[in-house]
Image (tube, rainbow, N blue to C red):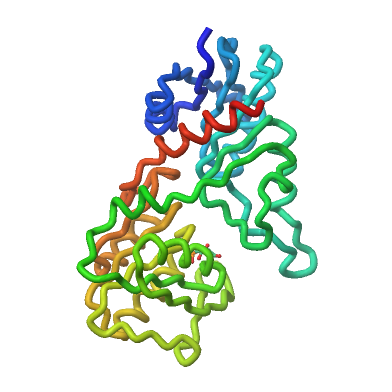
Amino acid sequence: MSAIQIFAFADERAPASRLAAALNAPLVMIETHRFPDGETLPHIPPPAAEISALYCSLDHPNPKLVELLLAADALRRAGCRRLILVAPYLCYMRQDAVFSPGEPLSRDVIASLIGRAFDAVVTVQAHLHRTGDLEALLGVPAMNLIPIEPLAAALPAYDTPPIVLGPDLESRGWVEAWVERLHGQPVVLRKTRYGDRDVRETAEANPVEATGRAVVIVDDIASSGVTLTKAVQRLRRAGAASIDIAVAHAMTTPGVTDALMKAGVRRFVSTDSVRHSTNAAPLAPLLAQAVRTIGQFL
Ligand code: R5P
């Protein structure tokens, strides 16, 4: 009996294989039947290891969450007693407050569902700006990995320390961690979001002295890409010599990614938490180490 087995759905065979290889563990694919009405039925071979780790990054969150919870139930019914969720991207973490009356606190609803289904969770750069405590949120042992090393390795080498720019106040902690790694100069912009694709920053409140400087924009998530686009425009106006982007989770459409490159971005890198054309920083070594560590506590 092996110590650990990795389970994954077909659409994530590639990153799950990389994790399985890093752990030297078998990978078991989950077959999913789709009924005519759209419901799905995962079928899971019986677990044959002391620990089962289900790899499921939660981009496209609504369909994936349902399949994840069904698969976790099937694993339990098949006798799994130690079940780890490996979700490099953890969804619904950005609705971490009731911003206007009538809204749910989505973060807590989803965290509670996941915490009840799994014994431990490994994720990457979760949006934890209003809580530092992922374990308290989920109610189970959890690790939130910060992928600066793999991302830094994918960036060009800088002759002199670059400006490390965070596009909003929430990126301040991430900027500080990057500054330590690159020995760069921190700059944090201020932005206000008025809608999904309406983000504004006040130039007067955001002085950026970037003439002739190399700049790397760092953020946890690129979703619509509007936040990055505004920051790139700002840096172009400020005369930056080069602009690179490093994000943990890239979800921009190909059109938006191309537009960023055309706007003068030299290198745009992301981890492979979500499949994207900018993926350049494999997470498997970090994830494998975390799964080994957290597995010892189960
Ligand atoms: C916000 O708090 C996040 O850190 C990102 O800046 C934001 O989610 C990016 O979203 P978008 O790409 O849609 O502007």
Q: Residue at x 46, y 86 (%)?
A: 206
Q: How many marks?
A: 0
Determine the image quadrant of residue 15.
top left
Q: Nearer the viewer, residue 179 or 25?
A: 179
Residue at horizontal 35%, vertical 78%? 233
Location of residue 16 in the rendering, given as x and y in whole percent from the top left corner: 43, 29
Q: Nearer the viewer, residue 204 or 212?
A: 212
Q: Is residue 245 left or right of residue 137?
A: left
Residue at the far left: name it: 159
Q: Is residue 224 left or right of residue 260?
A: right
Could you tell whether 289 is left or right of 61 in the image? Answer: left
Give residue 286's quadrant in the image: top left
Name, please, the residue furthest toward the bottom.
Answer: 204
Residue 223 in picture, x, y percent from top left:
47, 59
Quadrant of res 184: bottom left
Residue 140 visible to an observer of this rendering: yes
Q: Which of these two is toward me, 254 or 271?
A: 271
Residue 263 visible in the displayed image: no
**In this image, 258 relative to 111: left or right?**
left
Q: Residue at x 62, y 57 (%)?
A: 128
> Who is closer to the viewer here, 29 or 119?
119
Quarter holding the C terminus is top right
Q: In the displayed structure, would residue 230 be above or below residue 81? A: below
Q: Residue at x 52, y 28 (%)?
A: 292
